[in-house]
Image (cartoon, rainbow, N blue to C red):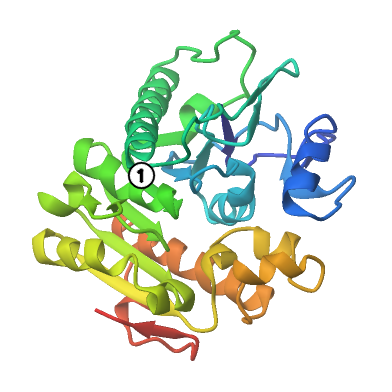
Amino acid sequence: MVSVFYPAADVGMHPRAHYASTEFVPGLEKRLGVEFPGLLTNSYTETPALTDSAHPVILYSPGGGVSRLLGTGQAEDLASRGYVVVTIDHTYEAPAVEFPGGRVASAAPVAGGYGKDIRNKYMAARLLDTRFVLDSLTQLAGGANPDADHRELPAGLDRAIDLEHVGMVGHSSGGYTAVEAMHGDRRIDAAVDLDGQIGVDEQFGRAVTEGVDRPVLVMTSQQIEEVGDARPSLDALWQHATGWKRQVTMRDSAHYDFTDMSVLVPAAVQPAAARYIGPIAAQRSTVLVRTYVAAMFDKFLRNRSGTVLDQPPADPEIAVLR
């Protein structure tokens, strides 16, 4: 299941999109520990796409066991900058995936816990999901309707996508997915890993062991740098990757400061969230993450110069590690 965010030609009388549907909200509220009845996004539903030119495509993959909804803010920001963004739910790994018509597929129970074998199977499924999405977008650009039920798609969407310029960004396991998918699929031109190790424990991905020849940006939290569990795979990636690469870290941040969770579930509301959200202000972390993700794709998909990646960090919260 995916959501597509894109520059709109005209929002007209189209309704604002809900963050989550009415049927889906109770379970999401219970999982996150906060209520957000009627929460609306900055997006509008079923609007005609802006077709003044074709727009580069960005795929978004969420963290392990997490909904694509937590990447909504990131997707909206990129769409506002002229990208078409497809956020992906990995069905039966995500806690719940709602399909058109209201059917909800919940995460499959795992006997014996989430060991290495299970997580490797999840990653294999994630890579297949990513390839399927790219194949479906190719069908769309060719004039076909890839919707499973052949519902009418927003006007102009087929003409709005530029599949010659594709990037992928992901958080945590989604970051692993982004870099690993780029290794295996030449259609992906640049990848951003937000606070994820690139492997399952000591078993590194092929992108690490074989290297990648296209650009990679890794953005890590202070929390993960202090814990150090991502460092071995990133060290190996730096040893083998032959393309442009950069790692920056964000001071006072924790693992979920790279998602909407820092805004939706402030630690003051949900004390348990303090394990996942750092002392950095949510508004500040949001701006920094979006700025660096956009700069990566502006630089390598649009060939723009003068981005924050082309100069020393001006923001005191950001440090270049390598």
Indicate the quadrant where residue 182 lies: top left
- Residue 281 shown left or right of residue 143 in the figure: right
In the rendered view of the protein, which quadrant contains the C terminus?
A: bottom left
Q: Nearer the viewer, residue 44 or 257?
A: 257
Quarter holding the N terminus is: top right
**Nearer to me, 168 or 47:** 168
Q: Quadrant of residue 305?
A: bottom left
Query: Height in image: 117 above or below 40?
Result: above
- Where is 67 relative to 304, above or below? above
Image height of 242 relative to 209, above or below = below
Q: Going by the picture, which residue comes out furthest to the right?
A: 37
Name the side, left or right, on which 189 lies relative to 71.
left
Q: Secondary structure at mark 1?
A: helix
* Residue 145 picture location, percent across and down: 51, 13
Quadrant of residue 266 within the rendered picture: bottom right
Whether residue 76 is visible here, answered yes or no, is: yes
> Label 1: how many residues lie within 10 Å, few (<14), some (14-19) or many (20+)?
many
Q: Is residue 182 left or right of residue 251?
A: left
- Check the image and report above or below for 265 versus 187: below
Image coords of residue 42 (percent x, y): 74, 51
The amino acid type of the residue labelled 1 equals Thr
Residue annotated with mark 1 = 177
**Could you tell me which residue is drawn at 44 percent across and 69 percent down?**
292
Q: Is residue 306 visible?
A: no
Relative depth, front residue between 38 and 104: 104
Furthest-front residue in this view: 112
Picture residue at 75% right of the left edge, 69% below the top: 271
Q: Residue at x 54, y 72 (%)?
A: 254
Residue 47 drawn at (x, y percent)? 70, 33
The location of residue 28, given as percent across then percent down, is 75, 42
